[in-house]
Structures are given as structure tokens and as C-alpha cells.
Image: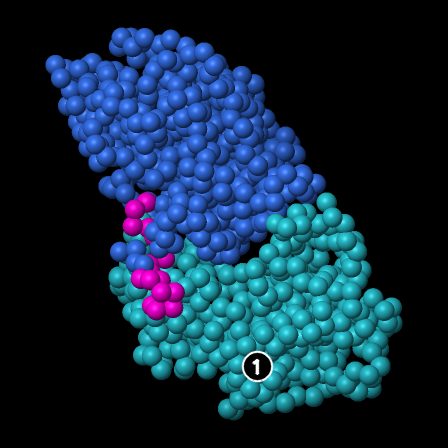
Chain colours: A cyan, B blue
Amino acid sequence: MIKIKKDVVVIGGGPAGLAAAAKVYDNGIEDVMILERDFELGGILPQCIHNGFGLHHFGEELTGPEYSQRFENEVEERNIEVKLDTMVLDVTADKKVFAMNKDQGAMEIQAKAVILAMGCRERTAGAIGIPGTRPAGVLTAGTAQRFTNIEGYVPGKKVVILGSGDIGLIMARRMRLEGADVKAVCEILPYTGGLTRNVVQCLEDYDIPLMLNHTVTKIIGNDRLEAVEITEVDENMKPIPESSEIVEADTLLLSVGLIPENELSKKADVVLDKRTNGPIVNEGRETNIDGIFACGNVLHVHDLVDWVTEESQIAGEWAAKYIKGDYNRTSKKIDVKAGENVSYVIPQSIELEAEDRKRIPLYMRVNTPLQAVDIALYADGEKLYSFSEPFAKPGEMISVPLAQKTLDDLDEISEIRVDIIEKEGE
Amino acid sequence: MSKDKYDVIIIGAGVSGCAVAWKLARYDLDILLLEKAPDVATGTTKANTAIIHAGYNADPEKQKGRLNKKGNVQIKDIVKKLSVPFEQIGSLVVGMEDDDLSVIDELLEKGKKNGVEGLEIVGKEWLQREEPHLSDKAVKALWAPTAGIVTPWEFALALAENAVVNGADLKLETEVLDVYTENDKVTGVKTNKGDFAADYVINAAGLYADDVARMVGIEKVDIHPRKGEYYIYDHAKDFQINHVLFPIPTKISKGIVCTKTVEDNLLIGPTSDFVDSKEDLATTCEGLDHVFEGAKKMFPDLTLNDTIRVFAGLRAADTTEDFVIEAAENVTGFVNVAGIQSPGLSSAPAIADLVAEILEDEGLTLNEKKDVIETREEPARFYELSNEERAAYAEKDKDYGKIICRCETVSYKEIVDAINGPVPARTVNAVKRRTRAGAGRCQGGFCGPRVTQIIADELGIDTTQVRLEQDNSNIVKHKIKGLLGSQGDAE
């Protein structure tokens, strides 16, 4: 077994890993290695051939491969070591990374810091327990996207999509462009889980029906999918049997949620947040394990890659500081709490000394769609400030800056809380 | 190496047919095992509770009762020789406060009659110690230490592989359409791949055993499919179950079982509902609810958060609710191995022995061959190896270094070996059964396209021809228009 020593090992060469690795390098730590399981860098981006990436980060609209290429270039320009087709099988709390690939076999890499950037996986038909059979033609939207855009094969011709997450919406349009008859996108909730722009550009522009309050209640067909039963649900999400209809389909794509891939994190004793299914981190994106950082979709599922980049650069910067010994905790840790209507806030704590920092971005999601909201920050229950937004949706992450000056002006507080509430009378 | 004439043709490569082939391949006989599906073990054998029962529950007056305990003992030797994952974790029939606890004592007596060893009544303290998550309403149980768990499809596969390496012919995707007789004696079978002559035909056609029996005019075999639905969970981390746990049984069912599997998943099920169609493998809302509610009675803390798969299987139940293993009365050389439901998996080797005896009675001479290959080389199972062991494998062969399935840690080499094994895997599910690629929490979301491509490459077929399981289950339909040149279409 090859034994290697590295300052920083980044697990995952998707947008999170690429941005984090480049940032580590730019902060003076050049001994960085990226481990990527696929044959190319970019994670999920190479198969996201639609546009809409980079509006926040670059101020222009890029496709997934283009967005990825910019960061692949950054990594290449810096001569950062990349191992492709390399699967990490184990990470320990003392930062030993065990990985394998065909050419080198097994390797054990002792790192000073590890950045977890493994991304997420899709929830499956089995996980949500859709009744019926288990034929060919039932697959997750992301797998179908890979087959279509990377491998060059179309999974089917008559398509129903369950779940209105962004991948589901994007794949509705993609299958339509490949000549498939996309019968419907079913969403069990009364609102879509994806971005508004995707509902407009992927469904409305192509006359693909979005069936809110509807779900697939049966998968039919023993060998190949033949049909699905679509049923309306009541306000408690219980199917209304008399509303069932059978829709002929040879393909059912599932876009029913993403789950951060934290199996490796757990091996390293990283503690996870029950709401995000990702590690609990401080503002430097360090987990409970000393020197193990996390960023991107392994930390919490993002809707825009731009936020992944921002977050990963934060993780990269602090990982570099950690190695340089420029990483000190303040005397008092501030817990960051999700308040009213907020499902989670990242980071979960603020505890690092930072001299030149202007603001700390707080990432959050609401747990229900809201109109005309006030987003309010509280320090130990005292309101700091608030600002208005026309709406807040669970599918769209909100980034709220917390000014460093505000923090500096506060004495010894122990908690920051964010509430997002609808303004009265509107 | 196909022959025109065989001594014995076995119809159906489920666990019973495979066990019979395994047994008969030890003798100087020409054997043909026929299976209509593209792989062995794709019927009842692949969808059950995966338990090697101790044998206390079966009626001693029935074939089930006579064969279960015998099979249980034989299996422990076979799994060692054939390198099949098996764990003797023991089973419990758990009585709750409000249950009729006298049933447990009755089972103990029945078990003793069946010759089951080690049976013991245990109390609340024992249960709480051994199964910390078990409901505190559990007060008394029958402990059967000889029960175990096995990977059923791998058990059948190992038996089939061993039969093949000992000279048996196996023909997949070969469906028997008729059985030929002359002067009330079997002469062969008609299949979709042509005719095969034989002096003896074994009907191990599972759900379709009555259809096959009717081909020689036997009406008494009457298979009524009875469905069982299940949930399977991701590898147990927070929630360990250490033994096979049954509730107090009813007349026709052992109730909702909670067990771990050899691969350390949790398995709960099955329901027990007669269905009209032998093709009805659909799970249902009501069935799955029933399974979960049943499991919750035993383990109140159980949630559905970590389930990765639901499935249903069909028991090939005969109306007699017993095995029907006997020579036909009206035709010489035809033997039924029908009605094989639970404890069929546990009884498989004993069923094979019985079939051999029946064949001898029917006039077949059984001469033991020399140089019978007794063992099967243990396939690499990366998911259960230490990192050091994985490293050693990768040093021997670079193809072990390439990991294809992340959830279950399956290497490229394991997949290629499965496709080129003695009973070759030709479908995505066949690869899954042999290697576990795609059997994990992402259910092939990541490795599915890769496994599909490896199968296409190894078999030299177009990607659009790669199937999930049966005919017409192609993974992808056609190539993207124009992008990659030639038009391939699965239809």
C-alpha cells in the first residue's frame, strides 16, 4: 500500500472540491490533493448541459460544463495534484484517507487537514417506498441525466416525472428535447421544490403539466415500466383514491430529494445535523473533528452552484489557515439558531478569530413558502436588524450577511437567531 | 457442449432445481438444468426472508416437517464448501404481554418432535440483553440457536455453479413448452430453444409447477401464489437486530419477521396474501403498512427513514400447504418438486436427497463419480474486507483497484468475474445478485450506468441491449439522435 503525506486532501472534485482546493493553494498551502471518483473533474456539472450557472458568481450565464471548466482551469493553473477514477473508502478522525484506483492500487494518505466535498445522492424509489413493481425504466432524474448527457443514451420515450426538484424540472425539458412525450411532473406538495425560473423555462415554455398535490401511487409493469398511477393528495398528503388515473409511461424519473453523502464523514466520527443531514460546522466550515472541513452539497443541499463556490472558498481559506496555525477560537462560541419558519442555518456556530473579516454569510432555508417576509436577526433574543424580501421559498436558499462590526459591537453573546416571518397586513 | 439426450432434465433453476442439479451432478449422469429467465434464482428464491429455519414450526406429519431440520443441518456444511455467506444467528419466536403464550410451549414440543436441537424458552431479561431495541412488552420467547440467515440467490447460484463445474449443462432463457411421453414414460421436453430428450424429468418450476405437471396429465398439483411484501433497510448502524425475530405465528403465516441479513441490512416482512396472478409482484400500500406496523410491535423505535428498497415475492404454495415431492403415478420418470414454499430454502439439500431416492426407486442408477469438485472458490467480496485485504487484492490484479459501486464497495474485477463466471451474469440484476453492485443506499444511481457499460463491453453487445432482468427490460431505449452516429434501438 502506497503511503503519502499531504497538507490538505480534498475528497471530491466537483464544484465544491475544486473551489476549495484552489482557495487552499491561494492561501499559501500548495501541498493539496484532490481525489475524484469519476473519470473527469466537475462532479455533477458536466452532465448539467443547460445554462443558468454563474449568475451570482460571475455575473454571466454559463452552462454546467463551462462553469466547471473555469474551476478546473484554476486547479490546473496551480498544478494542484488530482487523482481521477479514485474512490475514497475510508477517512479516520486522525485524518488518514484510504483510497483506491486502478493504476496505483491502494493508498493511505495522511493529511493535516481534510476537506469533505463528496456532494449528495438522490433519494430513490425504494427509499420513498412507492408501491408497485420494480421494472426497468424507473430511475432517478440525475441517473437519467447522466445516461442522456454523458453516456449518450435516452432512457425512454413516454415519461412521467415525480418530484419537482430542479433536476426533475431540467430533465422534463431535456427529455422533451430528445423527442420524448413528457406527460407530467407530479409534486406531492402544494408548491414546487425547484427554482421558479426552472418551472417557467422547463415546464411552462414546453407545455409540460405541473401537477401539484399529486403523487405516483403505483408503478405498473413487471419487466419494463408500462404505466404509473397518479393520484391527488389531500392537505395531509394522503392520496384521494377516487382521483387516481393510470398514465401510460415507459419511464418514471424521480426527483424526490437529495441526501448529502456523509457515509465517509461518519467513519471519521463527524457529527451530523438532523435537519441538513450534513456535518455541523463553524463559520470556517470546520466540523466537530479537528481539521476536517466540509463544503458544498455534502454539508447541505444547495440550489445554486454559485453558493457552493462561495462556501467552498470559505472552507478552503480556513483550511489553509488551520495548517498555517492561524486558526484561533474566540473565548466564546456563538450558536447560530434557526428561528421561526427557518429549517436550518449554516454555519451552526461562530467561533473563530478573524481580523480582516467584514461579514459572515449565513445560509438558510425556510420550511414553508412565505410572501412578503421580514428576515430578522436576533442576538440573545434582542433584535439586531431586519430586512424585507418579496417572498421566501423552501427551494431557494437565502443568504443573509451578518456584519462583523455588528458582532464586534456585541458583548459576549451566546446565540444568533434568524426568524423569517410574513409581514402583518400584507 | 449441448447434448441431444440427457439422463435427467430439471425444469426450473430456483433453489430447489439448483439443489437437485447439485446433488445429481455428483453421479455419473448427463444432467440438463433448464431456466426460462436469463439467470438462476429469479423467482421465489430471490424474494423471501432469507432464513434457514431451525425446523420447530413445520408439521412433523408433513414433508415440510421431515425435511426442514434435515436441510438445516446439511446446509451448514454446504455453505462452507461452496463459500456462501451464512450466519447461524439463531431465531426467536417472541411473545408479547397480550399474546397467547401457550403457543410458544406448543412450538417447543413440535420442535422436539422434529428433532430440533438446542431449543429453549427464554424470558424478558434474556430478551432485553440480547435484543436491546426489542419492545419491553416482549415477555417470553422460543430460542432456536440452530436457525440462520443466508443469501438465498447466492446459495442457489453456488449450487448451480457447482453442478456446472461437475458437468451439468445449464440453459438459461429456455422455457419448457411441453413434456414428451411415450407409453406412459417420459422421453423429453419441448422448449423455445428446441427439443431435449431425457429419461427423467424433474418438475421444479416453482410458481408454474402446476402448469408443467399438467403437461403430463397431472392435475393434483395446484399452485396458488401467496404474496409476501418486504422493506429492506440500509446497513444497520444505529439500529442493530441480532437474531431472527418472529411474532407468534398464525395458521398460514409466521407473521412479520424482523431480521438482519448476512450483508448487515435490516429486513422486515412478509405479508401473506393470496393473489390471482403468478406475475403479481407488486407491493401495495396496505401490504407495506402491514409490514411496518407488524415490525413496530416488535421494535417500537423503528422508523422508515433508512429503508432503501421495497419488494414482493410469491410463495409457490400448493393447496395442500405442503411440499409435493413425489414421482408421478401415471407417468414413469416424472418427478414433482412442487409447492416449495417456506421452509423450502432451508430444506433444499434434503429435498435434493429425497429426489435422488425417488429417482433410484424409479429405476435410475446412481453411480458416484470420481473427482467430484466439492468446493467453490470464494469470490472476492470487497464489501466485507479490511482496507489491508483490499490493498492486497489490488496488488494482485489492478482491476480490483477500480471501485465501481461506492455504496457497497464493489470493484471492477468482481463485476467482470461475475459476468464471466460458471453461471454467467448477463443482466444488471444478475450482476447485483452476485456482487451487490447497485444493492446499496443509492440503488445503482451512481454505478448503474457503469455496470450497464461493463456488461455491454464484456458480452460484446450494444448498450441498448443490456437488460435489467427479463426480456423487454432494457436499461436505455436508444442512442441520442445523431450524436453518436449509428442508430441503436432496443425496440
Q: Report whether residue B292 is seen.
A: no
Vertical position of residue B265 compared to residue B161: above or below:
below
Which amino acid, mark 1? Gly
Q: Report whether residue B464 is seen.
A: yes
- For disc 1, the neighbor class at 10 Å (few under 14, some 14 to 19, many from 20) is many
Which residue, as the protein is rendered here, is positioned at the far left?
B183
What is the span of residues highlighted in magenta in the rendered image? B470-487
Seen at 59% across and 66% down, the residue is A41
* Residue A85 quadrant: bottom right
Quadrant of the image for the N terminus of chain B? top left
The x, y position of residue A67, in whole percent, is 57, 77
The x, y position of residue A279, in whole percent, is 67, 63
* Residue B363 quadrant: top left
The x, y position of residue B465, in whole percent, is 34, 51
In the image, taking residue B381 as reference, residue B357 lies left or right, namely left
Name the residue nearer the viewer: B224 or B491: B491
Vertical position of residue B153 compared to residue A102: above or below:
above
Name the residue nearer the viewer: A389 or A307: A307
In the image, taking residue A411 as reference, residue B484 lies left or right, namely left
Seen at 66% across and 47% down, the residue is A105
- Dot 1 falls on a residue whose secondary structure is loop
Query: Residue tagged by mark 1?
Result: A54
The x, y position of residue B390, in whole percent, is 65, 41
Tell me which chain the residue with mark 1 is part of: A
* Residue A228 quadrant: bottom left
